[in-house]
Amino acid sequence: MYVLALIHGRQGRSGVFGEAVQARGHELEEWSLAWGEPPPRPLDDYGAVLVFGGSMHADQEDRHPWLKEETLFLQRLLDLRTPVFGVCLGAQLLARAAHAPVGPASEPEIGWYDVVLTPEAADDPVLSRLPDRFRAFQWHFYTYGVPTGAVELARSAVCTQAFRLGDAAWAIQFHAEVTRGQIERWLREDDAPGFDRDAIARETAERVEAWNDLGRELCAAFVEAAERVGAPA
């Protein structure tokens, strides 16, 4: 199975999710609408799509005109019931594609925050792989409304953290894909005023190995769900 990784610059890449895809014997291909060229192969060839984060916001079409095209692209994936999984900006864009509001959160979440699953996550084929409560790595200023017809699967004290839409689309606000190297680069390069970068780095060193194991497990669960969608009837 071919899996498309929809990326938004070098900061938001596939991380350990790419490892999980390959561990199940599938091929991952990265692509961005910002490149102004078609994906590596026809959309129908992909058994699943992963949509990752980025430094831009979902409503910045004036600065990133391709965001409008990406929203239409994601709407097509939803219409086709192509298995899709959004992370951070990817979650916000999926929510927007499903006509839910997206905008600034009441406060940013930068670093490690507690996330709690909702009761509806208990029998979800993907999020049920996670503990009922866990410490998650976050890096976001925006949030989204849960789309009409979707099921909220997780929350933090600040905002919704995960949803499932139908039986083929999932989204998470937290960064389950991120590697230690990515986090260290974000701490060096990204704008996060008011946050203790040293404290975040220390907590990352303590948590990132177990966090990466959880991320691989979460992505593997999504890929398994995508395999079932694509299996012969």
Image: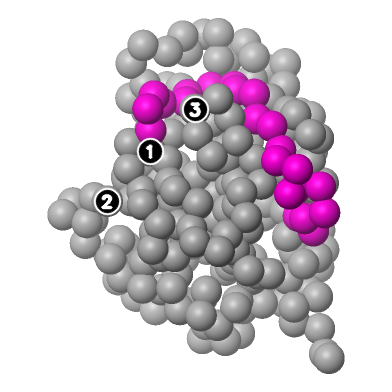
The residue beneath circle 1 is: 142
Crowding at mark 3 (Cα within 10 Å: few <14, some 14-19, many 20+): some
- The secondary structure type at the circle numbered 3 is loop
Instruction: Report crowding for label 2: few under 14, some 14 to 19, many 20 or more residues within 10 A (C-alpha).
Output: some
Q: Amino acid at mark 1?
A: Tyr
Q: In front here: 150 or 127?
A: 150
Visible in this render: residue 231?
yes
Q: Is residue 123 magenta?
A: yes
Residue 152 placed where, x, y %? 61, 49
Whole-percent x and y of residue 40?
50, 77
Q: Secondary structure at mark 2?
A: loop
Residue 230 or residue 180, whichever sits in front: 230
Q: Does the stretch in magenta take in 99?
A: no
Q: Where does the N terminus fall, quadrant-wise?
A: bottom right
Q: In the rendered structure, which segment of residues is drawn in magenta?
A: 105-126
Label 3 to label 1, Cα distance in Å?
Answer: 11 Å
User: In the shown orientation, is residue 226 left or right of residue 146?
Assistant: right
Q: For this rendering, which residue is in front, 142 or 67?
A: 142
Any part of residue 35 in sight: no
**Number of numbered discs overlaid on the protein picture:** 3
Between discs 3 and 1, the one toward the N terminus: 1
- CB contact under 8 Å: marks 1 and 2: yes
What percent of the width, then of the height, locates residue 9? 39, 50
Amino acid under disc 2: Asp
Residues at circles 2 and 3 in contact by the CB criterion of under 8 Å: no
**Amino acid found under the numbered disc labelled 3:** Val
The disc at residue 158 is 3
* Residue for badge 2: 59
